[in-house]
């Protein structure tokens, strides 16, 4: 098992960092090989420049500036995202990572004929985990449509193996969370990550 953990939060003191540390600890304890990408700590540039957009469909030139990230995606068989939900969606940093790294020739194959559709390019990835925190309630998040969750659990999921195993955990109402609610959520995260890596 080879796990790519993509972590996106600007503050090291955040609850998201606790989720990251728990997941990394579980992987380490189980002797599972992993790579951690801390987008803020690494100062990843999420901006899709005019040049990036111009060469977006030019394979393999389109991966030249993000080759390390593309290699990580090609290396792993399990993909885990950890991030805060802001304005019901992904942080700009993480959305920019998807924009720049999930390029044709790596994450998907462009249509070959008019009227065709893209084909998945990450079919070697058989497990997907998404762990987030939300200031809003569960009801309000899903009333709005949970666009962040949909982007990863539906959009990215379609690029992975057909029978990809998935798990999702969100701590809602983070702005009014308590030590008890956060501890309970970490237990949920532990149970879900253990289930994801168990088989």
Image (cartoon, grey):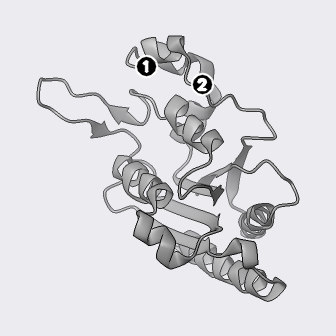
Residue 177, percent from left and from top: 75, 79
Question: Residue 67's mark?
Answer: 2
Residue 189, percent from left and from top: 65, 76
184 and 161: which is toward the camera:
184
153 horizontally vs 101: left or right: left
Residue 119, percent from left and from top: 27, 38
Helix, strand or loop at label 1? It is loop
38 and 27: which is toward the camera:
38
Please tell me whether residue 184 is drawn above or below residue 190 in the rendered image: below
Please tell me whether residue 75 is drawn above or below residue 183 in the rendered image: above
Helix, strand or loop at label 2? It is helix
Among the 4 quarters of the image, the one containing residue 13: bottom right
Which residue is rendered at x = 72% and y = 66% of the image? 23
Which residue is rendered at x = 46% and y = 17% of the image? 53
- Is there a contact, CB below 8 Å, between mark 1 and mark 2? no
Which residue is rendered at x = 68% and y = 78% of the image? 190
Question: Residue 131's mark?
Answer: none
73 horizontally vs 26: left or right: left
Question: Does any portion of residue 69 appear in the rendered image?
Answer: yes
62 and 140: which is toward the camera:
140
Among the 4 quarters of the image, the one containing residue 37: top right
Among the 4 quarters of the image, the one containing residue 57: top left
Residue 182, percent from left and from top: 76, 80
Which residue is denoted by mark 1 in the rendering? 56
Label 1 Cα neighbours within 10 Å, binned few <14 / some 14-19 / many ≥20? many
């Amino acid at each position: 098992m080879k796990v790519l953990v993509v972590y996106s939060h600007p503050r090291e003191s955040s609850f998201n960092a606790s989720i990251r540390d728990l997941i990394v600890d579980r992987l380490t304890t189980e002797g599972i090989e992993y790579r951690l990408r801390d987008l803020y700590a690494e100062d990843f540039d999420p901006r899709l420049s005019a040049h990036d957009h111009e060469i977006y469909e030019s394979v393999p030139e389109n991966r030249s500036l993000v080759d390390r990230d593309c290699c990580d995606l090609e290396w792993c068989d399990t993909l885990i995202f950890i991030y805060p939900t802001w304005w019901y969606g992904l942080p700009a940093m993480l959305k920019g990572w998807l924009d720049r790294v999930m390029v044709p020739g790596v994450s998907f194959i462009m249509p070959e004929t008019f009227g065709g559709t893209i084909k998945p390019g990450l079919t070697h990835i058989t497990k997907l985990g998404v762990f987030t925190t939300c200031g809003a309630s569960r009801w309000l998040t899903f009333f709005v449509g949970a666009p962040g969750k949909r982007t990863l659990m539906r959009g990215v999921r379609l690029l992975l193996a057909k029978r990809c195993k998935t798990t999702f955990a969100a701590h809602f109402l983070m702005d009014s969370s308590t030590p008890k609610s956060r501890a309970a959520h970490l237990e949920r995260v532990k149970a879900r990550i253990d289930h994801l890596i168990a088989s």
